[in-house]
Amino acid sequence: MPRINLLPWREQERKERKLAFFVWLGVAAVGALLVAGAGYVLLNSTISAQERRNEQLRAEIKFVDRQIEEINDLETQKQRFISRMQVIDKLQRSRSEEVHLFDEITKTMPDGTYLTSVKQAGRKLKFEGVAQSSTRVSTLMRNISASQWMKDPELEVVESKAGTGPAGDSFVLDAAQVTTAGDDDAASAPKRRARSGGS
């Protein structure tokens, strides 16, 4: 019976398998490198795009910040302008108060009473004068209380006047001026209550 040696064939098959293994291993390595390269390129592209978006967002944030600063400056200017307008409006409405005040002073003076001095410090008024009697001073205080332009009369001193000059009682009287700057109608047409005239 003849003998067949299969060793060379098996050795050849082993070599072919080894060669195929290395070929496929090389193909896998090349494929892995291609995948890794594509992933690297894609990752770099994504990072670059994100950086561009971040830079654009930073630029927009700076622009919005500048707009906010401008708005704040405009708001500050607006508040200053409103404050000035309020002061001007208050002065416009109160500029006739002094005229009304002096007119009211003459109307509150009862007969037999005259003033030697009128002083004003802010809204505080100080009257110095001479009255024929203390009753006239009381009448003056009632008239001030009933006035729309003065209030809170307070007598500092009243004493009999001696020596030269008109006879009577000298007095010092404090009062407060009524402001109507906050009232649109009161400054133009205040109602005056009835006052009594002393005798």
Image: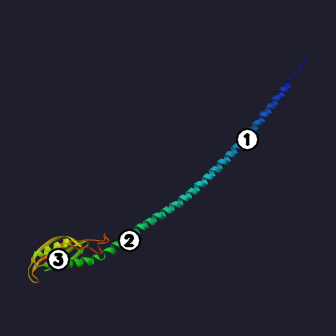
In the image as oriented, which residue stretches furthest toward the right?
2
- Can you identify the residue that label 3 sits on? 128
Residue type, numbered disc 1: Gly
Mark 2 Cα within 10 Å, few/some/many (few <14, many 20+)? Answer: few
Q: Are marks 3 and 1 in contact (CB under 8 Å)?
A: no
Residue type, numbered disc 2: Met
Viewport quadrant of the C terminus = bottom left
The numbered mark, 1 or 2, whose residue comes first in the sequence reads 1
Indicate the position of residue 141 as horizontal and vertical percent values: 16, 72
Determine the image quadrant of residue 127.
bottom left
Of residue 77 and residue 23, the one placed in the foreground of this image is 77
Residue type, numbered disc 3: Glu
Indicate the position of residue 185 as horizontal and vertical percent values: 31, 72
Q: Is residue 73 above or below residue 48?
A: below
- Can you identify the residue that label 2 sits on? 85
Residue 31's disc number: 1
Residue at image point 43% right, 67% down? 78
The numbered mark, 3 or 1, whose residue comes first in the sequence reads 1
> Marks 1 and 2, Cα distance to the nearest angstrom?
79 Å
Determine the image quadrant of residue 94.
bottom left
Taking the image as shown, residue 187 lies to the left or right of residue 198, namely right
Residue at image point 53% right, 58% down? 61
Taking the image as shown, residue 78 lies to the left or right of residue 52, namely left
Looking at the rendered image, the disc whose residue lies closer to the viewer, 2 or 3, is 2
Q: Are marks 1 and 2 in contact (CB under 8 Å)?
A: no
Mark 3 Cα within 10 Å, few/some/many (few <14, many 20+)? Answer: some
Indicate the position of residue 123 as horizontal and vertical percent values: 25, 71
Q: Is residue 50 above or below residue 115?
A: above
> Marks 2 and 3, Cα distance to the nearest angstrom?
38 Å
